[in-house]
Image (cartoon, rainbow, N blue to C red):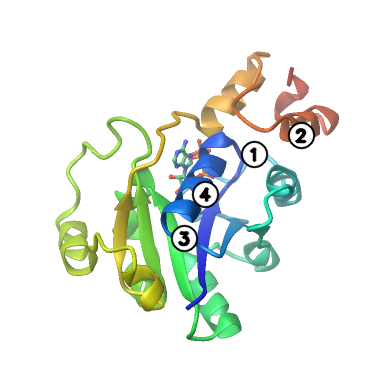
Amino acid sequence: MPNIGLLGGTFDPIHFGHLRMAQELAEALNLDEVRFIPAANPPHKATPSISSAHRAAMVQLAITDNPIFKLDNRELLRTGASYTIDTLINLRNELGENTSLVLFMGSDAFTNFHTWHEWEKIIQLCHIALVQRSVGTMKAPLAKVLETFLHNHYTENIDDLRETNAGYVTMQSITPLDISSTAIRTNLQNKNSARYLMPDGVLDYIKSNMLYNNSAK
Ligand code: ATP
């Protein structure tokens, strides 16, 4: 069946860590499409430092030359917290049962997964592809409920993710890129360059819109 990867995030701003993860998972899992879904009000993070319109515009610029990468604005059109479960229900209603959905998650995000709103229902609506964020981030012991969750849903057979529309968790190794939006914002605020951490088009957008303290180089 058709399969779509989903990468939710704050994208404040988008960087090569996000893009490379999407590219490598698309290839490893043989995905037809990857949707980048910016969060309006991420429930587990501080309110983003710039508007959702700017964050979405930067995602669009970053993915523009990749025919299978798409910007999905649905969380920006809702009010209230951007719960993943609501996004998945919404996508399911729109796409029907005959599409496999694969939610991408960095290892840092997975360690908190059991605190997400209605987290146990998420796996009924999609698969989850876990990637190692950077050396050390998965070293903290996983909560017992997450260990059980992995035990119940884990597969090493990626065909499982194409043959069913939801229910499996896989772990994929990708090129580790220790890039974060936080480090990029700090660079820019300290008047250091963020070149080679993100596409030049995104950096130009930051400069011309005077984002992150107007100090981009
Ligand atoms: P911040 O530094 O502001 O917390 P971030 O760089 O973690 O931001 P998000 O937009 O919050 O970026 O991340 C969205 C998703 O992308 C999360 O699942 C996160 O784990 C994953 N991710 C972000 N950066 C990387 C990276 N360098 N390598 C792999 N996954 C990443």
* Left or right of 8 on screen, residue 176: left
The image shows a total of numbered marks equal to 4
Foreground: 102 or 209?
A: 102
Q: Please tell me which residue is depicted at 62% across the width and 56% down the height of the picture.
A: 40
Q: Please tell me which residue is depicted at 79% across the width and 29% down the height of the picture.
A: 204
Is 63 rendered above or below residue 100?
above
The mark that comes first in sequence, 4 or 1, is 4
Amino acid at circle 1 = Ser
Residue at label 2? 201
Amino acid at circle 2 = Gly
Residue at label 3? 30
The mark that comes first in sequence, 3 or 2, is 3
Nearest to the eye among marks 4 and 3: give it.
3
| Cβ atoms under marks 4 and 1 closer than 8 Å | no
Q: Please tell me which residue is depicted at 68% across the width and 48% down the height of the picture.
A: 63
* Distance (Cα) linking label 1 and label 3: 34 Å
Q: Position of residue 13 (x, y in %)?
A: 63, 38
| Cβ atoms under marks 3 and 2 closer than 8 Å | no
Q: Position of residue 110 (x, y in %)?
A: 33, 51
* Distance (Cα) linking label 4 and label 2: 18 Å
Element marked by disc 1: loop
Nearest to the eye among marks 3 and 2: give it.
3
Nearest to the eye among marks 1 and 3: give it.
3
Amino acid at circle 3 = Asn
**Which class describes the residues within 10 Å of circle 4: few (<14), some (14-19), or many (20+)?**
many
